[in-house]
Image (cartoon, coloured by chain):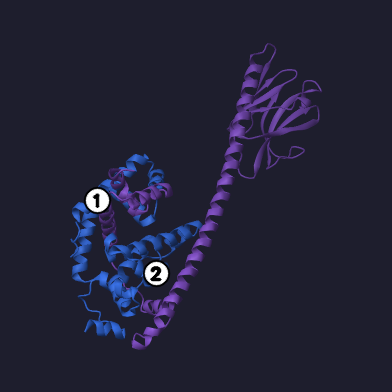
Amino acid sequence: MTCAEFKEQVAAWALGALTAGESRAMEAHLAGAEHQGCAEALRRARESLALIALAETPQRPSAAAWQAIERRLGEAPASSSARPWIGWLVAAAAVLLLFFTLRDRAQRLDEAAATARHEQQLRAACTADLEHAQKNAQLRAEALALLEQAGTRLVPLAPQGATVASANVIWSEHRAFVVGHALSPAPGKDYELWVIRGDQKIPAGLLRGDSLVAAIDPKLLQGGRPDALAVTLEAAGGRPQPEGPIVLVGKI
Amino acid sequence: LLSFFFATGLSPATAADGDDSLLERVARGDRRALKRLYDRFAGQVLAVGLRVLGSRADAEEVTQEVFVEVWSRADRFDPERGSARAWLMGIARNRAIDRLRRRQADSRMAEAVRGEERPSGPGPLEDAEARELRERVRAALMSLGPEQRTTLELAYYEGLSQSEIAERLGAPLGTVKSRVRLAMDRLAQLLPPGSDR
């Protein structure tokens, strides 16, 4: 680091606004022998900062404040007889300082651990999102490929009631995809897909997302062409049999 | 005469005492000198604590911590590196920011700041000279562009790093760095050393 670079950053350093690495670089530079006004620049920056504090209107501390400080220092009268006690006072202040330092350090360690945990959770959530996006992209490609195949049918699911949700089913003999929009249920609810054959209503998974592609389990297609597909609004996690209102339905 | 006072621990604390010499006496264990510094700076330390923390109780606690620290660390004060006031107010601001960060970590800051009124204690404490200086400092701060002033306040009163400020303001890091530098240069221009005397 050159002296010019040091002076460029000195205000931010005095403010404590540099990263730990940048601060170390500043300290290392200042510890060097040759300088072009670096210490003076730091001094000026500190003086300017001290003036910022003066912009605040001073407040009168409570009457008990000084007494509380004296208690912290260790009580000793301000007289000549106090002199032998000064060492003890300093020791007491040092013990207090040590106590606060250790307490601060413990709190900082706790904060660092909490930050690490939070970061780990964010990382896990981010990984899940990316994996979901990757899976979704793959499903979209497969659905698009199926749509372009000869003999594939496109079945619209008709909205029921006032729903804004919509979906189409890309259907072939062995594979099927639901392509849906606005399938974002209220908290505590889920949209559930059903394959309907005669009186049988077979759960085929939950549908979530503003713009989603979901594959229908091929095993559900093995019994031949179903009569219809339907989407109902169920309690979160879905139900083994439909209980909620029908939102979308389409005959195959 | 002075040596007599020092020998007996009854050092005189007059208005003529400089802050630096008071700190030197604190370093030698002179509690009256600490009291003198307290009388001079406690109001300002408390005000900074209030501005940073928004809570009078926390600001009072910080004020106590600051003067206990001054008592313990006065021997580390180096007049070559800055004035006693800059050193002491630096401690005040750092302790307030430390407490703010602990509170933020506990996710209690917002409630604490909103829940308490700032000037809830005894009234302002200042003389005409201090008031005149405060007005000049405020005028200097107000003469900064709003973006420079906001950047400086986020760093000074919230203890944010330049990267955090850039994120908070949605501004490029380079822009924030340049605002900090320009704002401090401008303050140094408007309030040159000794302008408070």
| SS assignment at label 2 | helix
Front residue (pair B31, A38): A38
| SS assignment at label 1 | loop
Q: Position of residue B98 (x, y in %)?
A: 43, 60
Q: Position of residue A177 (x, y in %)?
A: 67, 24
**Residue appearing at x 68%, y 16% in the figure:** A153
In this structure image, what is the colour of chain A?
purple
Instruction: Work out which quarter of the rendered image holds the C terminus of chain A and state it.
Output: top right
Q: Position of residue A37 (x, y in %)?
A: 24, 50
**Residue appearing at x 33%, y 74% in the figure:** B26
Whether residue B80 is visible to the viewer of this picture, yes or no, is yes
Q: Is residue B102 above or below residue B11?
A: above
User: Circle 2: is it few (<14), some (14-19), or many (20+) Cα within 10 Å?
Assistant: many
Front residue (pair A74, A40): A40
**Residue appearing at x 40%, y 84% in the figure:** A84
Q: Position of residue A152 (x, y in %)?
A: 69, 15
What is the quadrant of residue B131 in the picture?
bottom left
Letter of the chain that mark 2 sits on in the rendering: B
To the question of a shared chain for discs 2 and 1, the answer is: no
The dot on residue A37 is 1
Whether residue B153 is visible to the viewer of this picture, yes or no, is no
Residue under circle 2? Answer: B69
Q: Amino acid at mark 2?
A: Glu
Q: Amino acid at mark 1?
A: Gly
In this structure image, what is the colour of chain B?
blue
